[in-house]
């Protein structure tokens, strides 16, 4: 039973987009590794940008600098 955990920042991925990711990852494991889609688990965790750090600063800070 494959278990895939995807972490993304919480900034606007729609329910439809997340459903597409879940379907796509499930199909990828089926097509490439021969895994059974009925036993494949995909979890998407959405993390607040204040709780995600890159290069010693939060994503929130980095995005403010990019503007």
Image: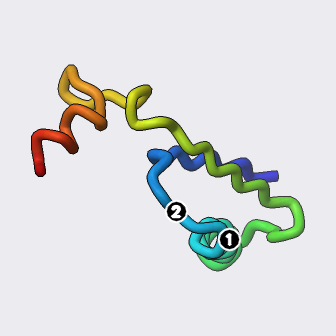
Which residue lies at the image location 77% right of the left edge and 54% below the top edge?
Answer: 41
Compared with 8, 22 (above or below) is below
Residue 15's image quarter? bottom right
Query: Which residue, given by chain and number where applicable, does mark 1 sit on?
Result: 19
Cα distance in 3D space between marks 2 and 1: 10 Å
Comparing labels 2 and 1, the label whose residue is closer to the camera = 2
Q: Earlier in the sequence, mark 2 or mark 1?
A: 2
> Does 54 sit above or below residue 6?
above
Q: Nearer the viewer, residue 6 or 52?
A: 52
Q: Give the SS element for disc 2.
A: loop
Q: Residue at x 69, y 50 (%)?
A: 43
**Label 1 environment density (alpha carbons within 10 Å; few <14, some 14–19, many ≥20):** few
Q: Is residue 34 left or right of residue 5?
A: right
- Tell whether label 1 touches label 2 (CB within 8 Å): no
Q: Which mark is residue 13?
A: 2
Q: Closest to the observer: 2 or 10?
A: 10
> Dot 2 surroundings within 10 Å: few (below 14), some, or many (20 or more)?
few
From this view, report whether residue 64 is shown above or below residue 55.
below
- Camera sees residue 33: no
Q: Residue at x 32, y 28 (%)?
A: 53
Q: Residue furthest right?
A: 38
Measured as percent of width and height from the top left, residue 38 is found at: 88, 68
In this rendered view, identify the residue nearer to me: 14 or 20.
Answer: 14
Residue 26 at x, y percent in the picture: 69, 69
Q: Which one is nearer the viewer's eye here, 30 or 48?
A: 48
Q: Position of residue 60 (x, y in %)?
A: 29, 36
Q: Position of residue 45 (x, y in %)?
A: 61, 43
Q: Is residue 29 visible?
A: yes
Residue 35 disc label: none
């Amino acid at each position: 039973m494959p278990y895939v955990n995807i972490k993304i920042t919480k900034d606007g991925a729609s329910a439809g987009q997340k459903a597409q990711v879940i379907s796509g990852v499930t199909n990828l494991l089926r097509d490439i590794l021969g895994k059974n889609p009925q036993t494949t688990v995909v979890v998407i965790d959405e993390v607040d940008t204040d709780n995600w750090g890159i290069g010693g600063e939060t994503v929130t800070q980095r995005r403010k600098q990019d503007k």
